[in-house]
Image (cartoon, grey):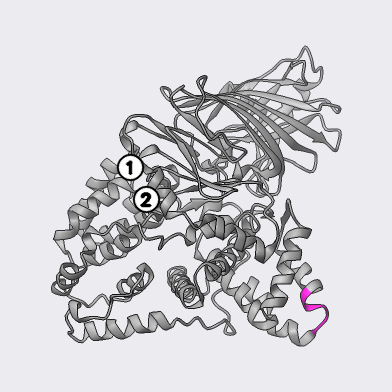
Amino acid sequence: MSIRISLLALFIAGIINFNCSQNGNNMEMLADFVADVSNHSYSKPEEVIVTHLDLDIEVDFENKMITGKASYQIDNKSGSIEMYLDIRQMEIEKVTLGEDETETAFAVGPEPDSEYLGRPLKIAIDADTKQVNIYYSTKPEAAALQWLAPEQTEGKVHPFLFTQSQAILARTWVPCQDAPGIRYTYNATVKVPKELMAVMSAGNPTEKNAEGIYKFVMAQPIPSYLMALAVGDIVFKPIGDRTGVYAEPAMIDTAVREFSEMEDMLLSAEKLYGAYRWDRYDVIVLPPSFPFGGMENPRLTFATPTVIAGDRSLVSLIAHELAHSWSGNLVTNATWDDFWLNEGFTVYFERRIMEEIHDKPYTDMLSMAGYQDLQDEIKRQGENSDDTKLKLNLSDRDPDDGMTNIAYEKGSLFVTHIENVVGREKLDAFLKTYFNKFAFKSMTTEKFIEYLEKELIAGDDSLAKRINLASWVYSPGIPEDHPVRESKRFEFVEENLAKWLDGTKSHQLSTQYWSTHEWLHFLRNMPDTITEERLVDLDSTFNFTASGNAEILCIWFQHTIKHNYTASFDSLEHFLMKVGRRKFLEPLYKELVKSEEGKKRAESIYAKARPNYHSVSTNTLDEILGWE
Ligand SMILES: [Zn+2]
C-alpha cells in the first residue's frame, strides 16, 4: 500500500513546519512528500535506520499526557536527506539534529483512511546526521496508554498508567520506526509524581526514590512493540536470584505466592533452549483492565491479575511469557504476517516448561484445551479462510486482526508435528541452534522454512514429505497429518459429564481431585441443550457463580446467559465492570447481544464499564455492540 500526500493538503491542514535557515534544500525536499507504507510502518529502514533511543519523558496524570524528547542515533546507510518515523495521536513540537540541537524542518502527513496506521513524520536530515531529537507530547486518547483513576486500582488511592505497544501502538507514545523487524537499544529517564514508581521493559528499580525520577537501560536491541512503561504505587518482592514480582502493595503477597515457581520455570527453560539472555526475569501484576493475559515485555512481563486463581492453576501464562524471551523477543517475527513464528513456538515451549514443572498428563490437558480452541477458531473463521493459514496476509488491515488462535494453536500443533516426525531430541537440538544463530534478529516465514529445510530435512525427501511444510504453513485449516491430542484426565471428566447429562446429581460426581483445567473442560463441553434447572443443580454444589477463577467464570457465564440463569447476573455484571481482558469480555458480550433482553443488559453495562477498558478491548467490543 502506498499513500501519496500532496504538499498543498499539508499546507491547508497547517501541519508542515519549516525551518529553512539551517537546511537550504529542506523546503524542496518536503515538497515532494511521498510516504509509502509497507509492513504497517512508514519508516524506510533500508535508507535510514534507528540504532539507539535516549528517551527523556515526564508522565502527567492530570492531563493524561507524556511529554518529552526522543533522541535517536541513526544509521544513514544511503546518505539520505530525509528520514521517516511513525506517529499517531501525538503532537510534534520541534525536531533538532545532533548534540548541538540544530533545528530542522519536519512534516507530518494527514490522517490516512486506516486510522490504526497513524501518520508519517518526515524529518529533514543531512547525509552525515548521526542524531535526531524529537520533542513531542502524547494525546489523552493515545491508544497504547491506559490511564487509570485511583478507584480503578487495587489500592484506590493513586492513579496508574500502563502501556501496551503490540502490535503497532508504540507509535502512540514514542515516535518510532514501528516495525518488528527494526531493533534498537534504549536508555530512558522518566519523571513521575513522587509517590509513584516507574518500571519499563529494561533494568528496573526495586524501590521508590524521593525525586520521582527513574533511569532505565535496555542494553539488548529490541523492536518497538516491546517498549513498555508502567507507573503506579508499585512495590517489588524477589522470588529467586533472577526473578521477582512487582505489584500494588495490596496485591504483592498474593502474587508472590502464586508465582513462586518462576525461578524453576526459568531454570527449566534454560535447560531446554540455552541461556537466558536478558539478565533478570520479573513480572508486574497490573490492574484488572490490562487487555491481554500477558505481554512479554523483555525483562518485565506485564500480566493480568486474572491469572491469580489462588492455586497456581493458571500460571502457564507466566511460562508462556517467559518462553517469549527466546521465541519472539530473541528471534522476532519480521512482519505481523509471520506472527505464528512468535506465538506457535512460544505455546509449544510454554507446554514443555509446564511438563518440566508438572508432568505429561497435566500438560496433555493444556494441549487438549488448546486444540479445542483451535477447532473453535477454525469453525468461526471457516475452514477455507485465508486467515487460518499460518503465514498471513495482513496488508491493508490492522495487524491486530491476525492475533488469533491460529498463530498460537495451529502454530504449536505444527511444531508438535515436527517433533513427532523427527523426534524430540533432534527438534530440541535444532531449536537451540536456531535461537542462538538468529538471536536479536528478525525472521520471516520463508527464511525459517529455508533454514529448517537445510538443517533438519537436509535433502531427505521422505522426511520432507512427512513434515509436509508447505501444506502446514500455506494452506488453510488443519492438515490431515496433524498430531492427535489426547488427555486421560479429560477422558475421566468426559465420563463424569456423560453421567451428569444422564441425570446423575452434581454431588454424586467424582470431582474431588479436579484442577481448574478439569473444571474448564467439563463446563466447556456442556451442551447447549441443558436446562436452567441443571445449572442450578451445578451451582448449588460447586458454587461457580462465586468462583474467584476468571477462566471458570468466563465459561460459566456463557452458559448462564444462554439459559437466562438470572441468579448469576449480579456476579456477571461485577466481572464485566472489573475485568478488562479482551479474551473474557469478547465471548461474554457476544453471548449477551444474542437476545433482545441481553442486548439491553450488555449496553447498560458497557456504558458504565467502557472507561475501564483499554483501547485494544474497546476496539473489539465497539464492533460487537454497534458502538460508534
Ligand atoms: Zn504470546
Q: Is mark 2 within 8 Å of ligand 1?
A: no
Quadrant of the rendered image containing residue 469: bottom right
Classed neighbour count for the residue bearing mark 1: other residues with Cα under 10 Å, few (<14), some (14–19), many (≥20):
some
Q: Provide residue 184's location: percent of width, then percent of height.
A: 71, 40
Q: Nearer the viewer, residue 180 or 113?
A: 180
Q: Nearer the viewer, residue 587 or 87?
A: 587
CA gap, disc 1 and disc 2: 9 Å
Residue 257 numbered tag: none
On the question of residue 475 being in view, the answer is no
Residue 610 numbered tag: 1
Give SS at disc 2: helix
Task: Look at 45% across and 29% down and name the residue there.
Answer: 140
Report the magenta residues as a range: 456-460
- Amino acid found under the numbered disc labelled 2: Leu
Q: Provide residue 376's location: percent of width, then percent of height.
A: 42, 71
Residue 621 numbered tag: 2
Left or right, 486 with reference to 159: right
Q: Are marks 1 and 2 in contact (CB under 8 Å)?
A: yes
The C terminus sits in image quarter: top left
Q: Main secondary structure of the magenta part?
A: loop
- Amino acid found under the numbered disc labelled 1: Arg
**Residue placed furthest toward the front:** 241
On the question of residue 610 being in view, the answer is yes
Q: Is residue 563 above or below residue 48?
A: below
Give SS at disc 1: helix
**Residue placed furthest toward the top:** 21
Q: Is residue 379 above or below residue 68?
A: below
Left or right, 457 with reference to 346: right
Quadrant of the rendered image containing residue 418: bottom right
Q: Provide residue 609's location: percent of width, then percent of height.
A: 29, 43
User: Is 174 inside the magenta-drawn segment?
Assistant: no
Task: Look at 58% across and 61% down and name the residue there.
Answer: 343
